[in-house]
Amino acid sequence: MKSWIYAGVSDKHDLLLYICRLLASAGAKVLLVDGTERQIYRYSIGQADQSLPITEYCGFDVACGFFSAESLKVYLKDQGCTIEDYDFVVYDLEKLTFCDEADWRTSAGIVWVTAFERFAVERSVEWFKLLFSKYPALQDISAGIVFIRYVESLIEESYIREMIRQLPVKWDEQGVKVHWDERDYGIQLENEHNRALHIKPLSRSYKKAITALTDRMAGSGIVKTRSLFRSSARRQVWANS
């Protein structure tokens, strides 16, 4: 089992839904865990029965309504399985206390997802400071960066990196940029209201970012991942039956 932590206060649920769909298309057993403050995923996936906190959605499982990663593990044990039964466990993490120190240290990768808005960056700096205050041993962790809703402006990546330079984190030298595109936003809205995942109409930039992140997680060749993307796109709609 490989766990990946996608942390940050910026909304990233659509990005992670697409990544998990591609991993599932490759035959992996995937669990996406909602560690957001607003429990946003149950609205996107159409969780019909909230008494069932793990919902199968488009080929992968989504866990909603848990207070912590530990409570999720206890629930799985009660169901006669373990979190180790999954090939990938992906955390969308906003709640500071959701994952314990061991969850952070054993994760295969940590990614900070942020927009360029000043609130998102400064709030994330505060968030990481609280994290290191709670778990001092996590200082000097390595982490990637994803810039979402990216637009060309006078505010450049180097400026954002200067704002986070004070944090004891070994950041990847190259960040992944998800350019803002009106079409992508429209598709996101349609997906949420239709309880589906359309992928074919996504912009080339968005597909490139999803491909890069999925490759990093799966360790697959980029050609293989792009092939999966085309195969998934031909289905056009992924919805629960």
Image: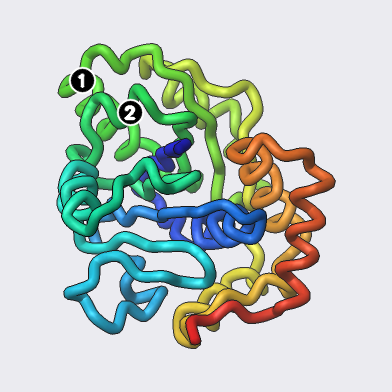
- The amino acid marked with disc number 1 is Tyr
Which residue carries the number 1 mark?
A: 135
Does residue 43 appear anywhere in the picture?
A: yes
Q: Residue at x 33, y 45 (%)?
A: 83
Q: Earlier in the sequence, mark 1 or mark 2?
A: 2
Question: Which residue, given by chain and number where applicable, does mark 2 sit on?
Answer: 104
Per the rendering, the mark at residue 103 is: none
Q: Secondary structure at mark 1?
A: loop
* Tag 2: amino acid: Trp
Q: Is residue 50 above or below residue 83?
A: below
x and y, in percent, of residue 146 in the image: 55, 41
Quarter holding the N terminus is top left
Residue 170: x %, y % from top left: 48, 16
As drawn, 236 above or below 20: below
Q: Residue at x 20, y 28 (%)?
A: 130
* Callout 1–callout 2 Cβ contact below 8 Å: yes
Give the residue drawn at x 51%, y 31%: 160
